[in-house]
Image (cartoon, rainbow, N blue to C red):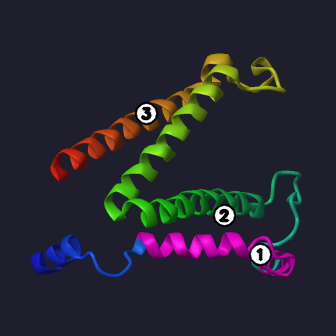
Amino acid sequence: MSGLVRRLRNDEGGLSLLEWLGIVMGILMLLAFIPQFRNGIDVLYENLVGKDNVGPNGEPAPGVLVRGIIVGVGAIGVFVGTVFLITYTNLGRRLGFLVTGAGFFGFMAIVGLLYTLYAPRGLRPTLIDGLNAFQLRILPGALMVGSMLLFIMFVAAMSRLEAEDE
């Protein structure tokens, strides 16, 4: 087992799983610009989950949740994967990963801060059942704090890598 760990740690040749994921996501992003590809994905999705957005009782159909999860995971994968692929080609594997992580979590910290300060727009918090204005901001505040901690960790790791290189 330790031989496998040593080999993975010292392997600088070839592409890692994360790099392959970045390449695949970049290709999927480019294919998304082709209307025939998008239509094929829509047909495949409708056959798997269904096309109705509303269930028989008026509640959202399960397909809406599945679509939201697919879009969310796919968007994050494409965003992070393509940025990592670009930084990998310019900075190398380790520094590219650290720069991508710091950029992503810095962006998420800013989004969490903005949502905590300025959201929600539209419905008044008093109209949402059981939630006041403070309770609506707990999740984005937690996102902001967690992302800020991860951002600081990535920046510290970059500093440590830089110190090791000298």
Q: CA distance from mark 1 to mark 2?
A: 10 Å
Residue at which label 2 appears: 70
The residue lying toward the viewer, choosing from 61 and 143, is: 143
Q: Which residues are magenta?
A: 18-44
Residue 28 covered by magenta stretch: yes
Disc 1 on helix, strand or loop? Answer: helix
User: Along the horizontal axis of the image, is 148 left or right of 125?
Assistant: left
Q: Position of residue 160 (x, y in %)?
A: 21, 44
Tell me whether circle 2 and circle 3 mark residues in contact (CB < 8 Å): no
Question: For the image shown, how many numbered marks are present on the structure?
Answer: 3
User: Along the horizontal axis of the image, is 129 left or right of 4?
Assistant: right
For the residues carrying marks 2 and 3, which lies nearer the camera in this image? 3
Q: Residue at x 38, y 34 (%)?
A: 149
Reading the chain from its start, which is encountered first: label 1 or label 2?
1
The residue lying toward the viewer, choosing from 60 and 133, is: 133
Residue at which label 3 appears: 148
Reading the chain from its start, which is encountered first: label 3 or label 1?
1
State whether residue 112 is above or below residue 39. above
Residue at which label 1 appears: 45
Neighbour class for label 1 at 10 Å: few (<14), some, many (≥20)? some
Residue 37 covered by magenta stretch: yes
Q: Amino acid at mark 2?
A: Ile
Disc 3 on helix, strand or loop? Answer: helix
